[in-house]
Amino acid sequence: MVSEVFRLVFFLFGQRRHVGPNTAHWMAEEDAEVSSDQAGPPRPKQKEWDISQSFSSLRSASKETIVQTNNLIEEKEARIRVMRTNIVATSKLNFERERQLDEVDKRIKLLVKNRIKLEDAASALDSKVVDTKADEKDATFLGKRAQYEELFRHLQSRPEYLAKMARLVEAKQVPSFVQTVVFDMYGDQYEDRDERLLLLCFRHALQDEVSSAANRGSLFRANTAVTQMLSAYARRGQGLAVLRTVLEEPLKALTSRKDLNLEISPQKVYAQLIQDSEKETGQVWAEERSVSDEVAAAHPVVKKIIEQHCVELLEISDHILNRIVEGVDKIPMGMRWVCKQLGDLCREKFADADRYQIGSLIGGYIYLRFFNPVIVTPDALNFIQVKPSRIMRRNLILIAKVLQNLSNGLEFGDKEQYMRIANPFIQARKDQIQAYFEKLADVDDLEDSWEIDKYQEHMSNKPMNLLLSQIFLCHNILWQNLAEMCPENDPQHAELRKHLLALKEPKPFPDDRVVVLQMANAGKHLDRTWDADLKNEAEQTVFTSRAKELLLAVATSLPEKSFESAKGDLIEFLVAQKTEALANNTALAEKLVELIAVLKTLNDKGLLKQNSKVLSLTEFLAIFAREVQNGHERLRHLTKRLDLIQSADQSISAHHTYLESRLDLYRMYLENVKKGGTTLKETTKKKVKDEKKSIKFSLQTLLDENVVTKVGSEIPKKFYKKVYFRFAEVSPAVFKVEVTLKEGIELNVLDKPLDLALDELLRKQEAHEDSLRFDSVELNINILIRFLNQHFVQA
């Protein structure tokens, strides 16, 4: 809970802790959630009120209204604090769960291919245990705990080191490094200090990336630690809520259209035309099956289909584009600041770059790393509850392609000639998207003043929970690059070098579990004033609350003429009023005596402070008067912020529930495998009979129905009516095909029975595979599926 004085100072700008003079109007995400008016230049400083103005404002206020408004504000702030805490914790947990699911998915694929053991696959589901106490058995870590705490305190306060490390980390270690920086070292996105230092880390990383880039085209396209850090940052808390607000509705509507097909590649449309024709008629396609793009595009039916698909593709792309552009004010301020850095750094590096080229770099972050992954895979965030079909996934990819080229400011060329049909759309919308990028980047910068250094000096009292593997990773990156990270005889890096030399060469820990590093100590990094503020917070709250109560009472009791011309020192003014009241109004005099005493205590103990500046009593009075005057506006502002933070909380919690349900599904699957099953369905459905149904057809009949398209020369035509194929459904949508011969005939048609799985046939069909060859016969996949559906699935 922040101190009452600081709540007064920053009430109009939302809840704050110790912040710099320009921080309040732009830094915290919740302000960005409420309005974009904080994205412009710094607001002009309000003229300080004198004693007369302040008391006049307090006198005109209704005490009952003030109490009621303040109670509502307290209630909403309490709810916001709870939700913010949940968002911070759950965002980190979700990132861990996503990593865990990726690992489990990889291991299950290896398990299916019999390349790893069941125990190895199941181990990926294990959760790490937090070490809340020193583990005496783990001497490797225990003996260096204090040294590691010193090292991570130093790294946390110097984000430029983490930015350098991001360029040195190996690809396989990137996810762990991203978690360490974005969710563990600076995980509290609603804490100004954490947010500032993380953004400073990004600034250093972006400066390094831009300065080393050979050209604009190579910037931020690779999947590096820096780009993954930016992506993870964008998906925290409010970012996920923004994605849901902007994209969930159109993506749900889009994917609910089961028959929607937006394909505009001539060859793919032609192949689909063949499939549809053969499935519908049961007749083999009479024209050429394999043709060039040019021939396919010239086909009259294909041409008409592509024209229809293109119209709908661009309409949907335009709708999603408008949703994105209209949501510019919803983008968290930190993400907008990153966009500003990209633009500013690239203007410096590439002086000849025009607005479209600068915009494409911003689009490379905000679209490619933020919006695009969700458009392509909305099921990954549970925006849709079913996995998209192959055709629907292709629809999403085509939409993403159009919007990505638009964000890059590039028209389609020879590489994807069929996409050129979208070029007029890109030309027509390029100024709209550039205006969006420019508005997105129109935010204040972090001020380059001593306040930044003050932030770096302030050490957090919050402990840091890290896996032993994360500790080893950071230590190892630093040690392996010691000369580059902290050159010898360079005083600027002497402290980091001292920490590393004290720890010596890192060795992997024997196990991997979570340990707690304490970030607060009595060392020189801990800001004593900051610590004193926290210790005196309870006393501060009591005195400021009482001072406000008495100021209201005095302002409404004093004759209006008494403070019409009040100037100078507040205590002198109150003492003069006390002297006059002693003769006429004993109750008022008593209140004045107490108010004077309370204000003197606040002043003498130095409890009225804004960062390093001590507030005068007159300034405190003016701040309180403005708070009272603007109570309703503050309440409206806070109510809107509460709604948006609640939306973020709901989005991040819903995503967590979805991730946990997927992990539970994997657990059920592995448990079933352990018991001898192969699929989840076997745990809930009774085993089917070995053979549900069987039917027999002669080879000639299958040829007549176009199921069989080719027969090897080893089977004479005179035997076509004497060779029989028996189809048996051995389990749902799984078939066995055996060949029987009329008595007296000896032929080798099939070496062994065929196994046909309908889902495998459908997969081949989706890949536009036309035929299936077994020994002496070739089957048409499209017509075979139609045949099986007619005789089994629909029977």
Image: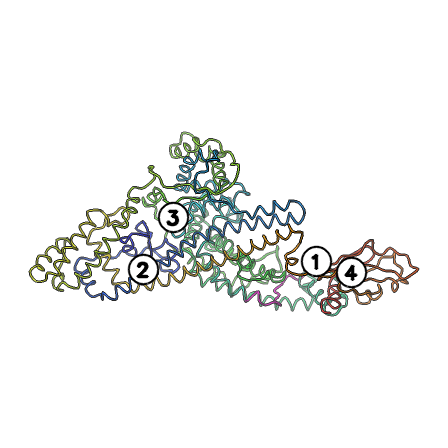
Say few, some or many: other residues with alpha carbon within 10 Å of mark 1 (under 14 / 14 to 19 / 20 or more): few
Q: Which residue is mark 1?
A: 760
Q: Nearer the viewer, mark 4 or mark 1?
A: 1
> Which of the two labelled residues, at mark 2 and mark 4, occupies the earlier sequence position?
2
Residue 218 lies, in percent from the top left, at 52, 47
Amino acid identity at mark 3: Arg
> Which of the two labelled residues, at mark 2 and mark 3, occupies the earlier sequence position?
2
Amino acid identity at mark 2: Glu
Say whether residue 415 is magenta.
Answer: no
The alpha-carbon separation of the residues under discs 3 and 1 comes to: 52 Å
Q: Nearer the viewer, mark 2 or mark 3?
A: 2
> Which of the two labelled residues, at mark 1 and mark 2, occupies the earlier sequence position?
2
Q: Are discs 1 and 2 less than 8 Å apart at CB?
A: no
Task: Check residue 196 in the rendering and tell me which mark sits there, or answer none.
Answer: 3
Q: Are discs 3 and 1 less than 8 Å apart at CB?
A: no
The boundaries of the magenta stretch are 253-266
User: Judging from the image, what secondary structure is the residue with disc 3 in?
Assistant: helix
The alpha-carbon separation of the residues under discs 2 and 3 comes to: 26 Å
Q: Is residue 133 above or below residue 240?
A: above
Q: Which residue is mark 2?
A: 74
User: Judging from the image, what secondary structure is the residue with disc 1 in?
Assistant: helix
The alpha-carbon separation of the residues under discs 4 and 1 comes to: 14 Å
User: Judging from the image, what secondary structure is the residue with disc 4 in?
Assistant: strand
The alpha-carbon separation of the residues under discs 3 and 4 comes to: 65 Å
Say whether residue 260 is magenta.
Answer: yes
Residue 410 lies, in percent from the top left, at 54, 56
Q: Which residue is mark 4?
A: 779
Which quarter of the rendered picture does the C terminus lie within?
Answer: bottom right
Say few, some or many: other residues with alpha carbon within 10 Å of mark 4 (under 14 / 14 to 19 / 20 or more): many
